[in-house]
Amino acid sequence: MPAIPYAASKAAVIALTVQYAKNLPSFRINVSDPGYTATDFNRHGGHQTVTEGTDATVALALLGPTGPTGEFHNRTGRIDY
């Protein structure tokens, strides 16, 4: 039961990403999942470093004009949804 709001919010963000990508074709609109990253927020309980958690976000921010758009990524690449 507690995961329902989280899963619903993630689905909404992905749907919004796809809609922005369709409506703004000259931009690269993507979303990234940092994964369970050790931060103050979770008392450093995550299994990866902050650097590892930001890999996907940085990679997406550096995309060129021919890069993917309307996709969901983590540090290993595209996530199917």
Image (cartoon, rainbow, N blue to C red):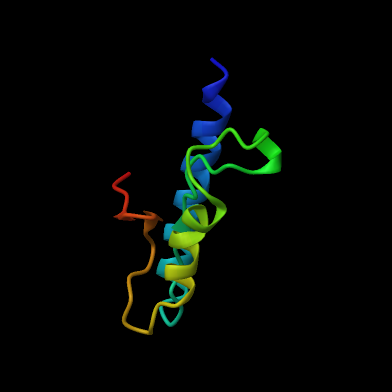
- Give the side of residue 78 with respect to residue 55, left or right: left
Q: Position of residue 61 (x, y in %)?
A: 49, 73
Q: Is residue 8 above or below residue 33?
A: above
- Residue at image position (42%, 69%) is 59
Foreground: 46 or 65? 46
Quadrant (top left, top right, bottom left, bottom right) of the C terminus = top left
Q: Residue furthest top?
A: 1
- Residue at image position (68%, 34%) is 43
Foreground: 72 or 75? 75
Q: Residue furthest right?
A: 40
Q: Position of residue 22 (x, y in %)?
A: 40, 68
- Give the side of residue 51 with respect to residue 77, left or right: right
Tally of marks: 0
- Residue at image position (37%, 84%) is 65
Q: Is residue 39 above or below residue 45?
A: below
Q: Position of residue 55 (x, y in %)?
A: 45, 61
- Residue at image position (54%, 37%) is 46
Q: Position of residue 19 (x, y in %)?
A: 45, 60
Foreground: 53 or 57? 53
